[in-house]
Structures are given as structure tokens and as C-alpha cells.
Amino acid sequence: MKASTGCASGTRGGAGAGTSPTDEECRLYYERCKDAFVQGRLVHARHILFAVTPGVNVHVLTVRAEQALIELSRKNATTQRFAELARELSSCPSADKGGDLGWFGSHECGEELANELFHQKNPMHGMGLHPRLVHSRHGFHIVEVLGRRQGRQATFAEVRDVIAARLRCNDCYV
């Protein structure tokens, strides 16, 4: 699933679907959506998933997730404690590995996680324990970023044909 960047391709200011976009239209799209054209950007993260399933008391689940986040946020919390809590509390198969998800890109995780891990401008969200629960269609996540690879910005020339194809399609999104 791809993360939404707010760069809808169907907004070309009057040009119809299927028509060839101009270089100017493609360049404007590239400048507006540059973040979508970074190649090789990866995050190494671990998480604890508190799954919202049928019949679960969401309030109780949220309180437990917030308690775990507070515990992990304490200055005296050890790095091993995250893995212990993941094994104890997480509903994700990664719990067996202490919640470790390994290295992944924005296209390899849910939209909600991608927005938090890849598309935030706030430097507080760079490395370490995420300061708040991340809500997704699966439930609540406590996330810790262990590493980042920034990737490389693709040049306009490298992605011009991809952009043109997106602009020809009214229903495509970055």
C-alpha cells in the first residue's frame, strides 16, 4: 500500500485524461511531490501492536498501550525492555523477534505507519521511540526507529516518464 502524499495526479488544470502532459506540468508535479521520488529511503524499526479485534474493549486496550509507551519513555527504561514488552503484549508475529520489523520502505508498510515514519517534517520523529501511539487500521502501535537510510533524490529526467504516465491517469495517486 502506498502512502498518501497529497499529490493527486488527476489535477492538471483542465487537461483531460489520456492527453500528453507538457514538460512544465511534469516539472510542477515533480517539484510539488519531490518526496515521492526519493529512491532507497528505508527505516529500521520495531513495534508493539495492540490489535483492535472484534469484541475487544478499545478503551482498555488504549490505556494498556499508553501505559506501555509511558514505561518505555522513562529515562531509566532499558533497550531490552522494548523487546520484552513486544514479546509480552504485541499481537504482531514480529513479537517473537522483540517487535523488530527490520529495514523497510514506505511502500512496504501501511499508509498510517508510512505517514508517521517517512513523511513527517518534525525532527522529533526522526530516531528513537515515537512520542505517541500510531493509530492504524490494525490497532495501536508503539514504534521505535532504530535506523534510517535517507536514500537518493531521483532527478526530474529519471522520473519524467513516470510523472507523465501519472498525469495521464485521473485515478492514480502517488
Image (tube, rainbow, N blue to C red):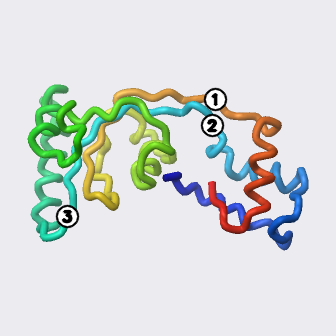
Kindly identify the residue that appears in the image at 75 percent across and 47 percent down.
162
**Badge 1 amino acid:** Arg
Q: Quadrant of residue 15?
A: bottom right
- Quarter holding the C terminus? bottom right
In this figure, which residue is indicated by the disc labeled 2? 38
94 in relation to 120, above or below: above
Label 1, secondary structure: give it: strand
CB-based contact (under 8 Å), mark 2 and mark 1: yes
Residue 6 left/right relative to 46: right
Query: Counting other residues with Cα less than 10 Å from the Cα at mark 3, is it few (<14), some (14-19), or many (20 or more)?
Result: few
Between the C-alphas of marks 2 and 3, the distance is: 35 Å
Q: Position of residue 128 (x, y in %)?
A: 32, 33
Q: Is 49 or 73 nearer to us in this picture? A: 49
Query: Counting other residues with Cα less than 10 Å from the Cα at mark 1, is it few (<14), some (14-19), or many (20 or more)?
Result: few
Mark sitting on residue 152: 1
Between the C-alphas of marks 2 and 1, the distance is: 5 Å
Residue 105 left/right relative to 47: right
115 in relation to 171, above or below: above
In this figure, which residue is indicated by the disc labeled 3? 53
CB-based contact (under 8 Å), mark 2 and mark 3: no
Label 2, secondary structure: give it: strand
Q: Position of residue 114 (x, y in %)?
A: 45, 48
Kindly identify the residue that appears in the image at 11 percent across and 33 percent down.
84
Query: Counting other residues with Cα less than 10 Å from the Cα at mark 2, is it few (<14), some (14-19), or many (20 or more)?
Result: few
Q: Quadrant of residue 124?
A: top left
**Badge 2 amino acid:** Val
